[in-house]
Image (cartoon, rainbow, N blue to C red):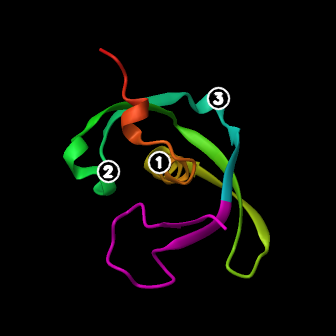
Amino acid sequence: RRIVVLNPAGQPIHWPHTERVLVNPVVDEVREQWGANVEEEGCLSLKSAGVGEVERPAAVRVRYQDLRGRVSVALFRGHGARVVQHEIDHLDGVRFTDRIRET
């Protein structure tokens, strides 16, 4: 199983109101009409890597299971889209440093 726990707003833990658990998440659609954003990105798992500019789709649809095994889909936009893509990258063995834009 692959599990991501999201708290994109970075709020203190008030389970289950601020966290979202995604089991076996997969980006199954990129919303092209929303375009892409280039933002500075870093990683708490790779603090020594610093930060870099990463381009990511501004909106993605993610298919996942909840904690009871029910399949669901969710649309993530803006910062939430960036966070979920970053975390799914971790599951796939991709680091944000692999996505830093060359200047």
Closer to the chain start, of discs 1 and 2, is: 2
Considering the numbered disc 3 on the image, is that residue within a helix, a strand or a loop? helix
Residue 65: which quarter of the image? bottom right
Q: Is residue 64 magenta?
A: no
Labelled disc at residue 32? 3
Residue 22: which quarter of the image? bottom right
Tell me whether circle 1 and circle 2 mark residues in contact (CB < 8 Å): yes
Closer to the chain start, of discs 2 and 3, is: 3
Closer to the chain start, of discs 1 and 3, is: 3
In x, y percent, where is residue 43? 32, 50
Residue 21, compared with residue 31, is above or below; it is below
Labelled disc at residue 86? 1
Chain part drawn in magenta: 1-24
Q: Which residue sits at x=68%, y=51%?
A: 26
In x, y percent, where is residue 97? 36, 36
Compare residues 68 and 80 and report the one nearer the observer.
68
In x, y percent, where is residue 36? 51, 29
Q: Amino acid at mark 2?
A: Cys
Question: Is the residue marked by circle 3 packed among few (<14), some (14-19), or many (20+) residues within 10 Å?
Answer: few
Foreground mark, 2 or 3, reads 2
Figure quadrant of the N terminus:
bottom right
Q: Amino acid at mark 1?
A: His
Q: Is residue 59 left or right of residue 51?
A: right
Residue 3, compared with residue 88, is above or below; it is below
Labelled disc at residue 43? 2
Question: Is the residue marked by circle 1 packed among few (<14), some (14-19), or many (20+) residues within 10 Å?
Answer: many
Q: Is residue 23 magenta?
A: yes
Tell me whether circle 2 and circle 3 mark residues in contact (CB < 8 Å): no
Residue 38, compared with residue 12, is above or below; it is above
